Amino acid sequence: MLAFFGNKSDKDAVDLMLEKAKSMLHPGGVLIIAIENQLGLKYLSGYSEDHLGRPMLGIEDQYTASTVVTFGKRELTRRVVAAGFTEQQFWFPFPDYKLPVFALSDRALADDIQTDFAALIRAACQTDFQKPAYTSFMPELAWDVIARNGLQGELANSFLLVASAEAIPEQNVVAYHYSAGRNSKYMKSVEFTLNNGSFIVNRVPLYPDRMDDVPGTLSLLLESEVFENGKLWRDVGYRLMMRNGWSINELSDWLRLWLSAFQRHLQDAGENIPAALTDTISGRHLDALPRNLIVDDGKKSRFIDQEWVGTGEIEFGFILFRSIWDLICDMQEIGEPSNGTSLQLASIIQLTLLQLGFSVTAADLSRYYEMEVSFREAVIGKALPRNASIIFRSLRRG
């Protein structure tokens, strides 16, 4: 800290910096501090300290008077209060404050609100560009138990602290999620507002004037809904495949629950249940995937966040493909499968669907892959490499 602020007195450099910041504020002004959490989960798992480039340096408290320094939540709170900023609001950006995807306030984590944001935290952390080649554990899988124990704020990777010497007005919005890596006409923010102990999810376009710029095969449906508690079914499948000894039977059971929910979803929409892969359904069901299926402990399920609507009809086989492809296409490694289980992507998909009564050929998979690439190109607004051989690669065992 001395390297950046200097120290011409016996005072601690951090205290001097906070004192200077306070002197520059107007009455009622706020100080905003964005800083890494010294005890952030990713640093505990082996990520390098951001400024000094060494893993565990912050965890082991190896900062010196000539280096930067970070703090845990309690220590940061104490130092800011000592500087006269007695009023504080904490926000927890994920994966961190530099390129946040999801930002959660301390108010959203109040003890009297029974809501689990672990799935959103996990998804945001998977976008972290600083991920090292190896970690001592998979931090993404730890957020569930962290949430159950109310430690999301203590172990967040970064803090965004709003501090003042006077009362800070409370906001109605207590969390934000951003979808920005897209064609600008599809970019959105999601605002979570607290209403009588429940969260209302409001989706807002980031560029509303561009939503109708270019006609295409996709439209973005922005609806408000109540935030649903429960497990994202994609996360259940992800945990299944990370466990040693997983089998095709288990994977097909996982997909079968989704299929039952999807069939009910179609019936509720007044559509017929498709029997063959080539049967078509409305493009409004394009997003009814396991990643958007909430399942509670009683196995009751509901689809959420149906943002993507395809123009016209889509093949049922493509939805089946998307449902399992979305689970495994980005998995860098998996658990050791049961004896005799192939690690080839195409084989996993074919055998899983076969147990549900659907025979899919290699040509079908290649065609569905091309359709998926076309969908993703429409979302991001630019061409992507097309290499159908990727579906015939083998997954790596962890």
Image (cartoon, rainbow, N blue to C red):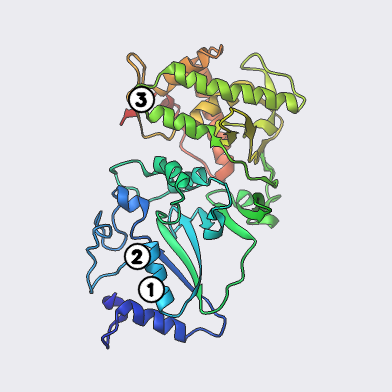
* Measured Cα–Cα span from mark 1 to mark 2: 10 Å
Q: Amino acid at mark 2?
A: Phe
Q: Amino acid at mark 1?
A: Arg
- Of the numbered discs 2 and 3, the one sitting upstream in the chain is 2
Residue 119 in view, yes or no:
yes
- In the image, residue 392 above or below residue 355: below
Instruction: Please state which of residues 334 and 85 is positioned toward the viewer in this rendering.
Output: 85
Tag 2 residue: 71
Marker disc for residue 79: 1
In the shown orientation, is residue 219 left or right of residue 143? right
- In the image, residue 374 above or below residue 248: below
Q: Residue furthest front?
A: 112
Tag 3 residue: 394
- Of the numbered discs 1 and 3, the one sitting upstream in the chain is 1
The secondary structure type at the circle numbered 2 is loop
Q: Amino acid at mark 3?
A: Ser
Instruction: Please state which of residues 320 and 383 is positioned toward the viewer in this rendering.
Output: 320
